[in-house]
Amino acid sequence: MKKNLLATSVTLALLPALVLAENSPPPDGMASFVKGTELYDAKAYDQAIAEFSEALRVDADLGVAYTYRGMAYYMVGKYPEAVMDCTKALEFTPNATPALLTRGNAYRNNGEHNRAIADYVKVLQIRPNHAGAFYNRGIAHYFKGEVDQAMTEFSEVLKSSEALDLHAEAQMYLGFLYDAKGDHARSAEAYQEAVRLDIANPSAVTPISEGRQAARQGDYDTALERYNTVAQDDPLYVIALNYRANAYLSRGDYDLAAEDYAEVLRISPAYTAAWSDQGFVRYMLKQYTEALSAYNEVLRLNPGSAPAFNNRAFAYFNTGDYDQAIADYTEAVRIDPVLSAAYYGRASAYTKKENFPQAIADYGKAIQYNPAYINAFYNRAELYTQNGNYERAVADFSAILALDENYADDRNERRYIYADVLNGRGDAYFQMKRYDEAKIDYESALTLNPALLDAYKNLETIADIQEQQFEDDGQEAVQE
């Protein structure tokens, strides 16, 4: 049975109370319905479904039984059945917020995020301050990777005083979202507030929030220990499991990460971020076909995701399908015209196809939108060198070195990169017959990386050339 992902407890509080006159016989079907509600409250969902079905067999117009049966179907992970029952319930009572909420949650867990959001919108039209609707709509946006929209929803939850039990989880999600935006100071504040709010009624919010903080500081062992404390029957287990996979991924344990992502997606097939991360880990394992499948699923769930097209293009690139890679990179920049990584990737694919002018143009676009894009400068410089445009090659290699005034420090963590840059500029100077400048660059490159054999050979060649030039100059002087 699939776990019920983030079921909202606020749904039950909205159902009307059923009061029967003392000693009066229950209406047709009502006896089974009441028994079903008792079983539902006892979490005996399969038995409750049987009773609600019996109630509806006796009285097919008992609309509230469709709502309750839909909720029970939702709780056992039968989302299509939940959608059908809640839709039927809404035919009887179009403004029934429990049916709308449950159907929205079922749509969301089935990967139909836009339909889910539409139902939450309807709830908010009926009850504008409904914290549960804001909360669940926030989760839908979170699953879609829509960071700003999700942040807005969870912020609305925190304004509400009717569902204080949701505040800790809302703060936790805000922590996730601030992390995604790179605002680690605010994410830390959100996690700390989540833990504070969770004290009164401790839940999985605390270990997940503490795990995220530890992971962000590079302490993956502590993060894993905290995630492992979340029980498998906890509604937030899938979130903890996903972040455990992230910790494994960051630690380089790709096989363990892949196993966890697979379990996350078994529980929650519509978790877009998990599909994306699964694609990345499969790429790291050189399982490109599996990576493509994962990115295809991301795009099925979120067809307008520029990062997903970019990532799938990268997988195609590694299978040697450069035309399909170019097509996906092109779609990525159509959706997000300033996505520098996509221009860089497309340039790399054009290079493989020996379309050097287009590759140079795309590296230029990547640099335009990311002026510190070292790899784009380097690759464009290499293409300029190959095509005899040595002045521009020197300019690009020099631009890289200008990004770090300490590039010549042999303690610099990027020293091997800068060694290659200096060696490349030396090659361009060499081709321009500017041997003194080439010699300086080769020697500087060897200081940073003594293993550059080509630099040694080129220095020897320069020495031979300059020696020959010296001899030629001497013979000319004697002749005069």
Image (cartoon, grey):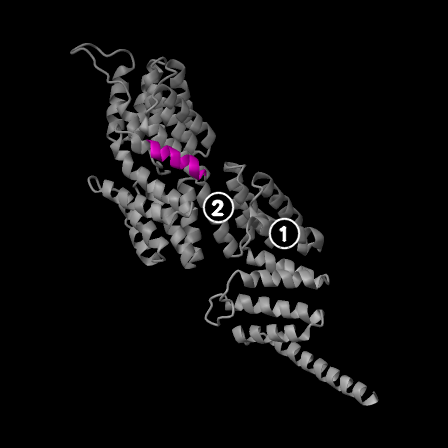
- Does residue 477 appear in this view? yes
105 sits to left or right of 287: left
Pointer 2 local density, CA inside 10 Å: few below 14, some 14–19, many at least 20: many
Q: Which amino acid does label 2 sit on?
A: Ser
Q: Give the image location of residue 84, x and y in percent.
A: 42, 23
Q: Give the image location of residue 33, x and y in percent.
A: 28, 19
Q: What residue type is labelled 1?
A: Gly
Work out whether residue 4 or residue 331 is closer to the camera in this orientation and state it.
331
350 sits to left or right of 135: right
Q: Which residue lies furthest to the left in this view?
A: 22
Q: Is residue 148 magenta?
A: yes
Locate the C terminus by quadrant: bottom right
For mark 2, what is the residue?
276
- Does residue 228 appear in this view? no
Q: Give the image location of residue 58, x and y in percent.
A: 33, 14
- Across the whole image, how many numbered discs are drawn on residues? 2
Pointer 1 local density, CA inside 10 Å: few below 14, some 14–19, many at least 20: many
Q: Check contact, mark 2 vs mark 1: CB within 8 A.
A: no
- Secondary structure character of the magenta stretch overall: helix
398 sits to left or right of 294: right
The quarter of the picture where residue 154 lies is top left
Q: What stretch is highlighted in magenta?
A: 146-156
Could you tell which of marks 2 and 1 lies nearer the N-terminus?
A: 2
Q: Distance between the residues labelled 2 and 1?
A: 28 Å
Q: Does the magenta stretch include residue 226?
A: no
Q: Is residue 168 above or below residue 281?
A: above
For the point 73% across and 84% down, which residue is it?
Answer: 470
For mark 1, what is the residue?
364
